[in-house]
Amino acid sequence: MGKAVIMVVRLVTLVCLVGSLILLLTSNQYSDNERLFYTDDQLLTKFNDFRVYVYMLVCIGVGFGYNLFQTLLSLSIGVSLLDLFGDMIITNILISGAAATYNFTLELNRTTDLEPNCFFNKIFVSAGLSLLATLFTLMA
């Protein structure tokens, strides 16, 4: 593959990871349950209330750091280090975070009273973008 194609694939991967990160960080929703007994801050469900979403945040951060490192290294010296094994390790990290997030969100959606159109949809799209970034990392 040409260097220009690899650079485009790496940049698309970075864009997917940034989009996934933004969606994950902005996902929150208020629960209408027991509004008389709790304050608004106690009723706000955020991504960091669940460890699985924090794990996905870490996976996205590792994937972003690796792809940024490879992109900058390719631009500066024209050589990509850790090409095959590094990409395989990062794709395993990204796919584990996305799969765990997707499965947990699906189960959480079934068992809670939160409306499925805001919080869960952002998390599902964030996991999908992380999976897309995984595919582009495999292509690079």
Image (cartoon, helix red, strand yellow):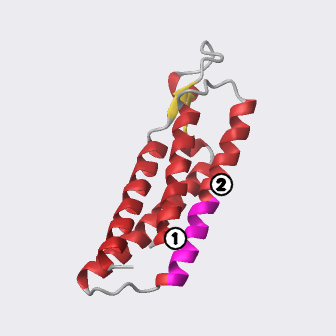
Q: In the current view of this chain or complex, which residue is farthest to the left?
A: 76
Label 2 crowding class (10 Å Cα cut-off): few <14, some 14-19, many 20+? some
Q: Residue at x 28, y 85 (%)?
A: 78
Label 1 crowding class (10 Å Cα cut-off): few <14, some 14-19, many 20+? some
Which image quadrant: the C terminus?
A: bottom left
Residue 54 covered by magenta stretch? no
**Left or right, residue 71 beside residue 40:** left
Instruction: Give the extent of the magenta segment.
Output: 84-96
Residue 99 badge: 2
Which residue does the numbered mark 1 point to in the structure image? 138
Q: Does the magenta stretch mainly form a helix, a strand or a loop?
A: helix
Q: Disc 1 vs disc 2: Cβ atoms closer than 8 Å? A: no
**Left or right, residue 75 beside residue 31:** left
Residue type at numbered disc 1? Leu
Label 1 SS: helix
75 versus 139 height, above or below: below
CA gap, disc 1 and disc 2: 17 Å
User: Does residue 45 appear in this view?
Assistant: no
Percent coordinates x, y for residue 75 in the rendering: 26, 78
Residue 86 covered by magenta stretch? yes
Q: In the current view of this chain or complex, which residue is farthest to the front?
A: 1
Percent coordinates x, y for residue 131 in the rendering: 55, 56
Q: Residue at x 58, y 35 (%)?
A: 120
Which image quadrant: the N terminus?
A: bottom left
Label 2 SS: helix
